[in-house]
Amino acid sequence: MKVMKRVLATVLALTMIVGLTGCGKKVTDKKGFKEALKAQDYDTDRISESDGDKHIKKSYYFSEDGIFASLIIFKDKESAEDYFDDYYDELKELKDDDDFEGTVKKSGIFSKQIKVDGEYTSKKNKGEIYAYVFLNDEVIVMVGANDNGKTAVKDVKALVKELGY
């Protein structure tokens, strides 16, 4: 019985620690998205905005010097989860079809993420990518670079951190 209490206490403590460390301020709106880009010295005039559809409220996209970021706000959590899962399935399919060489890794318990790092080939394009996709309730944030060299990786990670993910 004592062992069971210790295990339960340990699990609860770890859950609280993970919960507290994962509860940083994550960007979930246009204002925060713009502030994060500005803090990394990106030109916020390059943010484009799109009205949604039956599942998406609004979406924002940014691209400059090979770095890209997007914020998609869905109408509900289920739509965001479906989009996230479909996106992961498409990436895995590219890898399975040998159109992508590298890693596609899905992780996360409390907040889900996908990390993409490698080279892709299609009929029209060939290139490199380093990117993250985050699911946070009804919001999806993507940050990446059209390169997977040291500078691009550093820039992507800095923007991810600025966005709170």
Image (tube, rainbow, N blue to C red):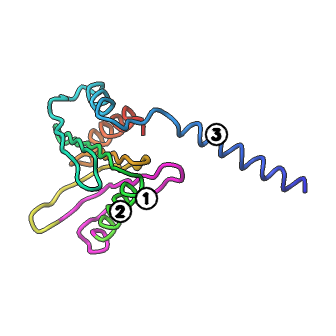
Write the residue at 64% across / 39% down: 17
Given residues 158 and 53, the one toward you in this image is 53
- Verify whether residue 101 appears in magenta: yes
Of label 2 and label 1, which has the lower sequence position? 2
Q: Residue furthest front?
A: 54
Assess disc 1: are there few (<14), some (14-19) or many (≥20) residues with their C-alpha within 10 Å of its C-alpha. Answer: some
- Separation of residues labelled 3 and 2 (CA atoms): 28 Å
Are the two marked residues, 2 and 1, in contact with CB atoms closer than 8 angstroms? yes
Secondary structure of residue under mark 1: strand
Q: Which residue is mark 2?
A: 88
Write the residue at 29% across / 43% down: 71
Say which amino acid is labelled 1: Lys
Q: Which residue is mark 1?
A: 106
Q: Which residues are magenta?
A: 94-121
| Residue 49 spot, x, y in % from top left | 18, 40
- Separation of residues labelled 2 and 1 (CA atoms): 8 Å
Given residues 79 and 126, the one toward you in this image is 79
Q: Residue furthest bottom?
A: 97
Given residues 125 and 17, the one toward you in this image is 17
Q: Is residue 161 left or right of residue 118?
A: right
Write the residue at 15% across / 66% down: 122
Q: Is residue 1 left or right of residue 121?
A: right
Assess disc 3: are there few (<14), some (14-19) or many (≥20) residues with their C-alpha within 10 Å of its C-alpha. Answer: few
Residue 30: quarter of image: top left
Assess disc 2: are there few (<14), some (14-19) or many (≥20) residues with their C-alpha within 10 Å of its C-alpha. Answer: many
Of label 3 and label 2, which has the lower sequence position? 3
Say which amino acid is labelled 2: Tyr
Residue 154: quarter of image: top left
Residue 17: image tag: 3
- Separation of residues labelled 1 and 3 (CA atoms): 22 Å
